[in-house]
Image (spheres, helix red, strand yellow):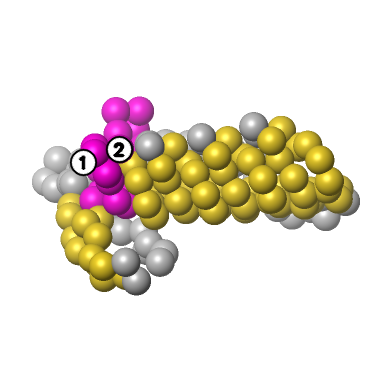
Amino acid sequence: MKFDQANENNQNGTTNSIQTTVNNNTGSSQIYRVNISDGSIYTGTFKSCLKDGFGRIDFPNGTFYEGQFKNDKMNGKGLLTLENDYIYEGNFKNGLRHGEGSLKLLNSDYYYIGEWKNGIKEGFGNIN
């Protein structure tokens, strides 16, 4: 499942919350688009009022995360873009890079592919 970015604006230019239903392998899910107080926009599923399941969060600085959420945090596989032209793709746990993942610098040959623990490169990995 992947979201296409869409803008639903009302007359004063703010984004509306929208709701839709999608069918996936586990049944149908309610997809919401919600403005967050820090200026971020989350599009995805919720469980008990927390981000849970597949979603995308667009941050005010232009970066985004798209992937799995659990208990309101990035958990599972996902893709995170960072301000300084880095892209991380891999596993997350409690909002941090954790497990297998790759970090690449756009417009450069730099990359790290390997293990992460609590947001820090740790264990086996390759750096170029």
Circle 1 SS class: loop
* Residue occupied by mark 1: 14
Image side of residue 31 versus residue 40, left or right? left
Q: Residue furthest top?
A: 38
Q: Quadrant of the N terminus?
A: bottom left
Mark 2 closeness class: few <14, some 14–19, many ≥20 residues within 10 Å: few
Q: Nearer the viewer, residue 82 or 46?
A: 46
Q: Residue furthest front?
A: 26
* Magenta highlight: main SS: strand
Asked if residue 5 lies in the magenta stretch, the reply is no
Mark 1 closeness class: few <14, some 14–19, many ≥20 residues within 10 Å: few
- Can residue 59 be seen in the rendering of this structure? no
Residue occupying image coordinates x 24% and y 39%: 48
Q: Which amino acid, mark 2? A: Leu
Residue occupying image coordinates x 20% and y 63%: 21
Q: Nearer the viewer, residue 115 or 13?
A: 115
Question: Quadrant of the rendered structure where residue 6 is?
Answer: bottom left
Q: Nearer the viewer, mark 2 or mark 1?
A: 2
* Residue occupied by mark 2: 50
Range of residues picked out in magenta: 32-50
Q: Nearer the viewer, residue 20 or 64?
A: 20
Q: Position of residue 8 (x, y in %)?
A: 21, 54
Asked if residue 38 lies in the magenta stretch, the reply is yes
Q: Position of residue 12 (x, y in %)?
A: 14, 40
Residue occupying image coordinates x 25% and y 56%: 31
Question: Quadrant of the rendered structure where residue 35 is?
Answer: top left
The CA span between labels 2 and 1 is: 22 Å
